[in-house]
Image (cartoon, rainbow, N blue to C red):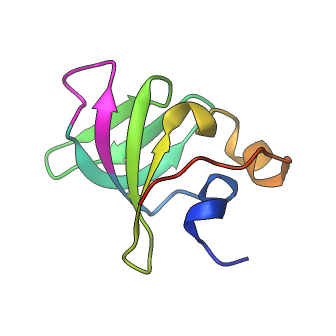
Amino acid sequence: MNLRPENLARHELIGLHLTVEQSSNPCQAGLIGQVIDETRNTFLLETKAKVVCLAKKNTSLDFTLPSGQMVRIAGSVLISQPENRITKRMQKTRWKL
């Protein structure tokens, strides 16, 4: 299955470029980096300066796909253990280009 905006939530996200569009933590809004690890509730984001633990809840995230396409997705849609999120059946993901 190819990585497309409509199936982003069911794919491996480690390695993707990520921009934090909005966050409940004002210090994290605007962070840019690469996802280096993922847990049920967080991403580890490697920025130029440091590695940041980023909560999925109450965030709006912009992912850059390998094709160069940008996709905005609510972090709450991604709350789940990665291995379970990939295999479970999900409602249609709301995404925005």
Instruction: State the residue at coordinates (49%, 31%).
Output: 56
Q: Is residue 49 left or right of residue 60?
A: left
Q: Is residue 32 left or right of residue 9?
A: left
Residue span colored magenta? 19-29
Q: Quadrant of residue 90?
A: top right
Instruction: State the residue at coordinates (54%, 57%).
Output: 13
Q: Is 6 above or below relative to 90?
A: below
Quadrant for the N terminus in the image: bottom right
Residue 52 image offset from top left, x and y in percent: 31, 36
Residue 74 image offset from top left, x and y in percent: 50, 37
- In the image, 80 versus 58, the foreground residue is 58
- In the image, 70 versus 54, the foreground residue is 70
Q: Is 28 above or below relative to 69?
A: above
Q: Is 30 above or below relative to 64?
A: above
Q: Quadrant of residue 3?
A: bottom right
Instruction: State the residue at coordinates (25%, 30%).
Output: 28
Instruction: State the residue at coordinates (58%, 71%).
Output: 4
Residue 37 image offset from top left, x and y in percent: 50, 47
**Does the magenta segment cover residue 33?**
no
Residue sticking out furthest to the left: 49
Q: How many marks?
A: 0
Residue 30 image offset from top left, x and y in percent: 20, 40
Quadrant for the C terminus in the image: bottom left
Q: Is 7 above or below relative to 4?
A: above
Q: Is residue 56 left or right of residue 9?
A: left
**Does the magenta segment cover residue 23?**
yes
